[in-house]
Image: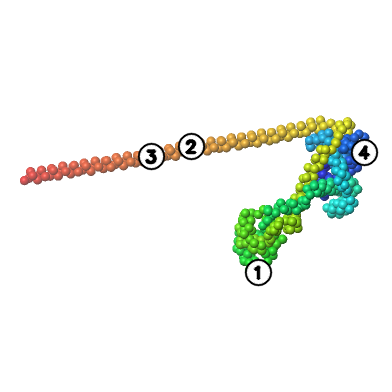
Amino acid sequence: MKFTSFMKGAAVKRVGALSLALALGAGLVGCGGDGAGSGAVAATVNGQDIMEQTVTDYVADFRQSASLESDEAWGQWLVANSYTPESVREEVIDYYVNQDLYEQAAAEYNVTVEQADIDEALEQTKAMFESEEAFQQALEASNMTEESYVETVIQPNLLQTKLAEAVAAADSSDENGDASLQAAQEMADQWNGSKRSSHILFSADDEAKAQEVLDQINAGEIDFAEAAKQYSTDTGSAENGGDVGWDALNSFVTEYQEALNGLETDQVSTLVKSDYGYHIIKCTDTFTVPEGGITSIDQLPAEFQDYITYMEQNNASSNFTTWFAEYRENAEITITPMPEGLPYDIDLAPYEEQAAQDEAAATDANVDTDATTTEGDAAAEGDAATTEGEAAEGDAATAEGDQAAAEGDQAAAEGDAAQGEQGDQAAAEGDAAEGDQAATEGDQAAEGEQTQE
């Protein structure tokens, strides 16, 4: 339940090395769903009382283990976690209702927890700590003793586990068949032809080395498993000789699966290129459903049997959850109104107001930060615009200057051309005049000669 979940987190945070199993019991010291304590009745479960004092003690132990003993710390925690004293009481009662129902159902199914089971579970928990002293320190930090830990954690957990097994066994008996064998038969077609394989993986730029190792394997110069340990970059499988299990229980990249499909048992592939690099693949086993089908679970490879067991456990857990929900729904559960004056029932108004003020302040701070950021962005945009404007004006002035210079060059060129034309014209006119003058003098000379004659 949500309330005890937080308690687990708080206990682990304080103790550090505290195991999950131990944390489950934090805050349960001195409490029990058997009606222990005095005063009013908080709830009844099929006629069995849960005392108000039991709920109050639970909350008190939790507050102590989580350092929430002051009203201020308690109020702040309630508001921060969206709790009220009423909702806390409701969840604690809900916890004890379930515990009582587990015990009642266990009695119906003749389920008991033996001392040997308790001793084994306790030893398993202690093994999670560096020493006996470390375990005792964790108990003390959780306000528990070894006896209370056994009573409030180990026994309830074992009882629930055994009850789930009993319910699953009863369901299996009702089906009049072996559930494991039935599951194997249902999976037969899917598993038929499945292949187990090992591989040696080389990086994409190490093709030459991959081919060299493949040649050594094919020549019998090196064992495949040894080559995997020595050369494979897939360190996870390398330690197991490259084994990656059955394709029916795993998912391989397309190139790998296609290559494996073409191999027989003990056959080694050529180099197979994938996104991971180059593979050398060996088919190490093939499963074929025997003629007549599967008649015993022992006909399956061990990995397939383990898979069926795993699925059964998951199904059993899911089925037990469904079963228990129905069992609780059919139970007679009565919860009494919350009495006044409980020590954990405090006024939350001051803490809610403070939380609202803190939230508003945080919002304002975010708004101010956003405004400052916006102003900064606007200033940056203004600077950019100014820079762009100045650059544009400079470019325009430069362009105008270039145009004026071009016009000057053109005028100079026109002037040079005009002067050239005038010079040519004068020269031409001079030549013509000189020609005319020579012609005239020639004519006059001719006439003189005629006169002399």
Which residue occupies the foreground of this view, 433 or 101? 101
Query: What is the quadrant of the N terminus in the image?
Result: top right
Q: How many neighbours does mark 4 have within 10 angstroms: few (below 14), some (14-19), or many (20 or more)?
A: some
Residue 383, x across and y down, in percent? 58, 36
Q: Mark 3 points at which residue?
A: 410
Is the residue 269 above or below the residue 114 in the image?
A: below
Which circle marks residue 64 in the picture?
none
Query: Of label 1 and label 2, which has the lower sequence position?
Result: 1
Distance between mark 4 and mark 2 Cα atoms: 94 Å
Q: Is residue 116 visible?
A: yes
Mark 1, secondary structure of its residue: loop
Q: Which amino acid does label 2 sit on?
A: Ala
The residue lying at 76 percent from left, 32 percent from top is 356
Mark 3, secondary structure of its residue: helix
Which circle marks residue 37 in the picture?
4
Is the residue 371 above or below the residue 120 in the image?
A: above
Mark 2, secondary structure of its residue: helix
Distance between mark 1 and mark 4 Cα atoms: 78 Å
The residue lying at 84 percent from left, 38 percent from top is 331
Image depth: mark 4 or mark 2 in front = 4
Q: Name the residue under label 2.
A: 396
Q: Are marks 1 and 4 in contact (CB under 8 Å)?
A: no
Q: Can residue 14 be seen in this view?
A: no
The residue lying at 72 percent from left, 33 percent from top is 363
